[in-house]
Image: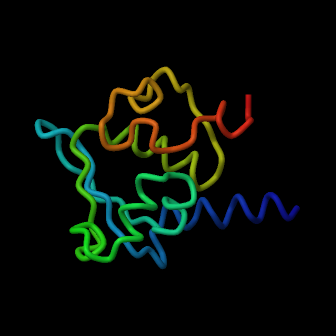
Amino acid sequence: MADFLHHQKMQSLLESGEFSDVTLVVGQPEQNKKELKVHRFLLSAFSPVFAAMFSHTETKEALEKRVVIEDLSTEAMERLLRYIYIGKLELPSLLPWAAGESSCCGRAVHSPERRGLT
């Protein structure tokens, strides 16, 4: 029961953006951009790239509380966030970051192999 409640609350935080403290602006230049309200502590816990970005108070992203990611589709970022927030991993072959194709988030999140999940 506790796992279900935890999953439910984390999914609610992801979907609502409640208590968020940073905005990800995601989408390739030719696409419509999407703004995702997220939580720095969660991104930092799973990504050394985000951890470095947010731990230095003088970075543009830390000051503006806004991160623009143009080399990743919104679908890929949403899948990545579902993994970070609720542990739901969807077909990594569809994710550019899993293949190391994104310069922003490529290998930014510890892969399941590195986390001992496979």
Q: Nearer the viewer, residue 44 or 25?
A: 44
Which corner quadrant of the image does residue 116 belong to?
top right
Q: How is the image coloured?
A: rainbow
Horizontal and vertical percent position of residue 19: 48, 79
The spot of residue 37 in percent (x, y) is: 38, 66
Q: Residue at x 54, y 48 (%)?
A: 82
Q: Residue at x 47, y 68 (%)?
A: 39
Q: Residue furthest left?
A: 30
Name the spot of residue 108 as percent of width and height, x first: 45, 44
Location of residue 12 in the rendering, given as x and y in whole percent from the top left corner: 58, 65
Quadrant of the rendering where the N terminus is positioned: bottom right
**Which of 30/55 is in front?**
55
The picture quadrant where one finds residue 103 is top left
Residue at screen point 26% across, 66% down: 61
Residue in the foreground of this view, choosing between 39 and 109: 109
Vertical arrangement, residue 19 with respect to residue 11, above or below? below
Most extreme residue toward the right, as rendered? 1
Above or below residue 20? Residue 31 is above
**Residue at (21% x, 43% y) in the render:** 70
Residue at the outermost top position = 93
| Above or below 75: residue 46 | below
- How many marks the image carries: the answer is 0
Q: Is 56 left or right of 85, judged from the image as shown?
A: left
Left or right side of 92 for 31: left
Q: Quadrant of the C terminus?
A: top right
